[in-house]
Amino acid sequence: MAKILIIGCGTIGSELAGVLSAQGHDVTGLKRKPPQSASGPIRYVAADISSPTELADLDSDFIEAFFIVSPDERTEQSYRTVYETGLNNLLARLPNTHWIMVSSTSAYGQTLGEWVDENSAAEPDKITSRLIRQAEQRLTALNPKNIVVRFSGIYGPGREYLLRQAMQAPDIQQSPPYFTNRIHQQDCIGVLAFLLEQRLAGKALSQCYLASDDDPAPIWDVMTWLTEQLHYPLPTARDSANEAGMNKRCSNARLKALGYRFQYPSYKNGYLELIGAKG
C-alpha cells in the first residue's frame, strides 16, 4: 500500500482515486472545492496550489503524487499559475515524493503530419504549450523517477465536442490531410494506474510516455465516419486552413511495449459507445 496524493480531482483524478483506493492504497485528493458530500475511503483536502499558505497543512510524506491540474482559462497567466507557481509550491512542500505529471501532446511543435514519439523534438510555439513543456523539464530534472504522461485529445462522457460538431454539418479540411489524435478518458485513468503499478512493482520506467490510441486519423475521416453513424449530412470539404498548428500523428509504441493495452484502441470503439448511450 502506498500513500498517494492526487492533485486535481476532476473526472479523471476522482475516478483514478477510486481505482487506487480499491486496490488498497491510501489516497488523498487535493481540490480547491472538494465535494461536500464526499464519503468513503478517499480523503479530500481543500487547497489552492497557487497559495503556499493553503498548502502549509498538507501532509508531506506522500510516496506518490499525480499532477492532473488544468488551467482555468486558456491564457498565459492562467497557465503560469498552474505550471509555474502551483507546481513550484507543491514541489517545495513535497520534496521527497515521486511524481506522475499529466501533460499534453501540445508539447510537440510538429505541423506537417509527422509521426512523433517520446524522442521527437518537443519545441512548441505557443506560450501556453511552452509553459507545459517547461514544467515537464522542471519535474523530470528534479528526480529521474518522475514521469510525464502526454495525453492527446481526451474524449468520453462529458467530453463530446466532436459529436456536437458532427451534428452541425461542419466545414472540415480534407486535403492535405490534417491528422488528429485521441484517447478515451477511461484509458487516461487506465494508463495512470498502470504506470503507478509498474513503478511500485520495481519496473524500470522511462521519464516520458505518450498516451494516445492506436488510430491517429485525418479529421476528415473522423468527422465523415461520425456523421454517417449519426445519420447526419456529411461534412463539407474546405481547403487547407489555419488548423495546421497541431497536425501530427502520435505513436504509443513505448507505452504498449511496457504492457499497456487500450480499452478503446480506436475512436470508433469509443464513439460507438457514446452514440449508443445517447440512444
Image (cartoon, rainbow, N blue to C red):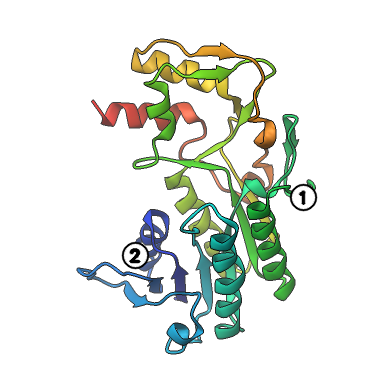
Horizontal side of 44 relative to 207 (left or right) equals left
- Secondary structure of the residue carrying tag 1 is loop
Horizontal side of 63 relative to 37 (left or right) equals right
Compared to 180, does 28 lie above or below? Answer: below
Instruction: Report the amino acid beneath label 2.
Output: Ala
Q: Which callout, 1 or 2, points to the residue nearer the camera?
A: 1
Query: If the image is split into quadrants, where does the C terminus sit?
Result: top left
Q: Nearer the viewer, residue 240 or 260?
A: 240
Residue bearing mark 2: 22
Across and down, in percent, residue 156 comes to 39, 40
Q: Residue at x 60, y 65 (%)?
A: 80
- Residue 123 shows which numbered tag? 1
Q: Residue at x 36, y 68 (%)?
A: 21
Q: Nearer the viewer, residue 100 or 198?
A: 100
Q: Nearer the viewer, residue 13 or 134?
A: 134
Instruction: Report the amino acid beneath label 1.
Output: Glu
In the picture as drawn, the residue positioned furthest to the left comes out as 37
Categorize mark 2 by other alpha carbons within 10 Å: few (<14), some (14-19), many (20+): few
Horizontal side of 207 relative to 15 (left or right) equals right
Name which quarter of the figure residue 77 lies in. bottom right
Compared to 170, does 87 lie above or below? Answer: below
In the picture as drawn, the residue positioned furthest to the bottom comes out as 57
Categorize mark 1 by other alpha carbons within 10 Å: few (<14), some (14-19), many (20+): some
So how many labels did they put on this image? 2
Horizontal side of 74 relative to 243 (left or right) equals left
Q: Residue at x 70, y 18 (%)?
A: 176
- Secondary structure of the residue carrying tag 2 is helix
Residue 198: tell me if it is visible: no
How far apart are the two marked residues, 1 and 2, measured between alpha carbons? Answer: 39 Å
Across and down, in percent, residue 261 comes to 53, 43
Across and down, in percent, residue 55 comes to 46, 83
